[in-house]
Image (cartoon, helix red, strand yellow):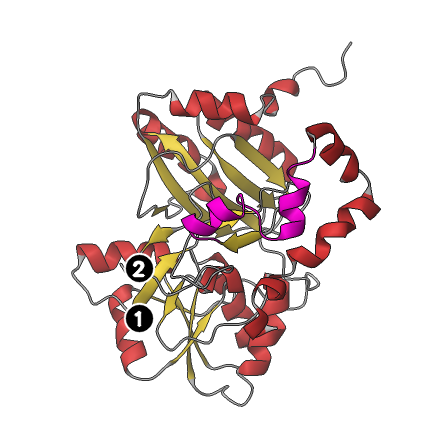
Amino acid sequence: MDPNAGKKELINRFGRKELEARLYAEDFKRVTLSFYKYVIIDDTQELRDRLFKEWSELNCLGRIYIAREGINAQMNVPEQHWEEFKTKLYAHPEFVDIPFKIAVEDDGKSFIKLTVKVRTRIVADGLPDDAYDVTNVGTHLDAASWNKAMEEGAIVVDMRNHYESEIGHFENSILPDAETFRDELPEVLKKLEGKENEKVLLYCTGGIRCEKTSAFLKHHGFKDVNQLHGGIIDYARQIKTRELPNKFHGKNFVFDERLGESISSEIISHCHQCGAKCDTHVNCANVACNLLFLQCPECAAKHEKCCSTDCQSEVHLPAEEQKARRAGRENRKRFHSHRKWGDLHPEKS
């Protein structure tokens, strides 16, 4: 008997081209959303398998992480299955009435497959389990309270990575120059040294990183820690529905096929190759590099969607030769220098 019998239906078995063809052939709309919750999950694998089966039956797509500390999900749901999706999710005791953040700009093509993975953390902080109490979080502010606190001079901290804040951020924010959340926590703590008694405002895409950061700062003696409820995604919804002033400039980076959604009409960033105004993220066409960077249409044509001349030369090699050249750890290291963000940002190196 096949030891994996019964498990094969719990993974995706199709290639990218077939998945994309299926998605673009659909004649119905999808709702793109994100949600998270810090909650103790005893059997992560069992829950993972149940959710994958339920969501597969509803034709949901997305990227979901489950850990003992909770769930972090970015996904889309066929519009005709939206109510059934909510009913099934809320039927899990861990996720009763979990709040959703609905995408600002949504063409329904945000994800091409369903991936549900068990992880050690839903947000990796690089710290031991008992380093601080992740449930002792700060005060959640709605958009109106957030704007008021900003106007009153509170310290605003962006808890996203540098490539996210580069294309959009709240005015007068502290923007850490970090590539990962685990690098960002100590950097933010250092930047806020001596400000333990001041009002601190934290924000991120949907709120999950701020949730941990607020607990981390409170553990380190900060008295007035606040976070933007629902993150930038829900802030955009609130300012539109409640006709509030928009204090966010530019685009919000999102972790799906779109890579960004406009919160204001401003373009505050620049092409990494020519310096023209640009807020479009792309991945280098050289698979061995795959660097995420900003590239305008003119440079995309000129450099064939590559980040460097080395990568441009690489993509002209036969496919089999490219595959052979990137096989093995040592060969993959050849492009690591191009993957460093500072190499395309000499002014920030």
Camera-nearest residue between 271 and 29: 271
Q: Earlier in the sequence, mark 2 or mark 1?
A: 1
Instruction: Left or right? Give the position of 35 relative to 286.
Output: left
Q: Where's residue 66, x and y in %?
A: 58, 43
215 is within the stretch colored magenta: no
For label 1, the residue is: 146
- Dot 2 falls on a residue whose secondary structure is helix
- Dot 1 falls on a residue whose secondary structure is helix
Camera-nearest residue between 68 and 112: 112
Q: Where's residue 131, x and y in %?
A: 67, 68
Camera-nearest residue between 136 and 34: 34
Q: Are marks 2 and 1 in contact (CB under 8 Å)?
A: yes
Whether residue 58 is visible? no
For label 2, the residue is: 235
Q: Which residues are magenta?
A: 295-317
As drawn, the residue found furthest toward the left would be 243
Q: Residues within 10 Å of mark 1 (few under 14, many from 20)?
A: many
Which of the image's four quarters has the N terminus? top right
315 is within the stretch colored magenta: yes
For the residue marked with disc 2, what is the amino acid? Tyr
Q: Identify the residue at image location x=36%, y=57%.
A: 251
Q: Where's residue 198, x and y in %?
A: 43, 86
